[in-house]
Amino acid sequence: MNNTFIFNRFRLLVRRQWTENKKVYLLLWGVISLSLMVLSFFSERYDLYLLYILLFCFGGCVMTTTLFSRWSDFGRSSFFLLLPASITEKFLCGLIYGIILFIPLYCLNYFVTRFIFTYLVILLFPDNLLPFSAVVTGGINEITKYPFSFYAVVFLTFLFTQSLFMIILVRFKKNQILILLLTIMAILVLYNSGIYILMSNIVHIRGGSIRHPGPFLTFFSADFGYRSLHNQAYFDYFSFTKLIWKLNDLMWFVVFFMLYLTTRFNLMEREL
C-alpha cells in the first residue's frame, strides 16, 4: 500500500469509521451525559473536579477502542489492516475521532448537560430555583474562573491516559484495560519515587517529609515542599517560576506527542 496521503481516500475512511461505530459513539455520549448529570447534582455540596477529569479521560479511552478495530477479533483486525488506505490516513482518522472531535464535543456536552439540561430536569421538582439566565451565567463564570494552567493539566492528563491506552490497544490483543491500569500505576510509582529522591537531595533536610510536585505527574503541580520534624503543622513550599512551569508543560506535551507517534509505528508493524 502506498503510504502517501490522499485526501479523498482519507475522507472515505473517516466516513466509514462513523458508519461502523455510530451506535457505540451515541451510546458513549449517552453514558457521558448521564454521568455529567449525576455529578452535577452533587457538585453543589462537594468538589468533584477530579471526577470530571477522570470522566473526561475515561471517555477518551473508550473512544480509542473504536479507532483501530478490535484486535481480539482476528477477522475485524485483519480486515482493518488490509483496508486500501495508508497507515498515516488510518492514524489521522483515529486522532480526528479521538482528539479533534472528541475534546470540543465533550466541552460542549459538559456545558449543555450540566448547566442547561440538568436545570430542565430539576424543573420537574417543586423548588425555589434561580432563573435560567442566572444558571447559565453562573456556569460561564464557573468555567472562566479557573486559570489556563488548570485546563492545561486536564488536557495533559487526557493525553497521558489516551496515548498510553492507544499504544496498549494496538500492541496487545487481550487484557488491555488491566495492562493500562498496571502501566499507569507503575509509571506513577516509579516517577514519583524518583522525584521524591530528587527533591530530598535538593532540600537537604535531616528529617521530616517531602511533598513532591503533584500526586500524578509534574504537570499537575509546579511546586514542591517539605515539612520539618520540629514543626509538623507547617509546610514550606517552593514554587517553580512561570517560565520553568511552561517549559515543563511543553516537555510533557512533546512526550505525549511521541507516544501517539509510537502508535503509528505499532500500526505499521502490525500491517507488515
Image (spheres, helix red, strand yellow):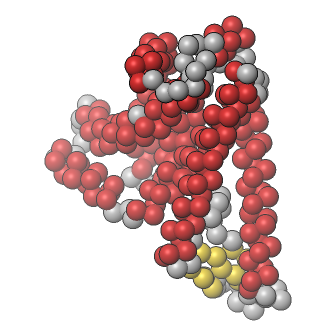
Which residue extends farthest bottom?
Answer: 230
Q: Residue at x 59, y 75 (%)?
A: 223
Q: Residue at x 74, y 63 (%)?
A: 192
In the picture provided, is 164 more to the left or to the right than 136?
right
Which residue extends farthest right?
Answer: 206
In the picture provided, is 182 more to the left or to the right than 67?
right
Q: Residue at x 70, y 89 (%)?
A: 231
* Frontmost residue, 102 versus 259: 259
Q: Residue at x 53, y 26 (%)?
A: 4
In percent of width and height, residue 164 lies at 66, 41
Quarter residue 265 falls in: top right
Quarter residue 107 falls in: top left
Number of dots carrying numbers:
0
* Frontmost residue, 197 versus 82: 82
In percent of width and height, residue 71 lies at 70, 19
In percent of width and height, residue 60 lies at 53, 36
* Frontmost residue, 4 versus 66: 4
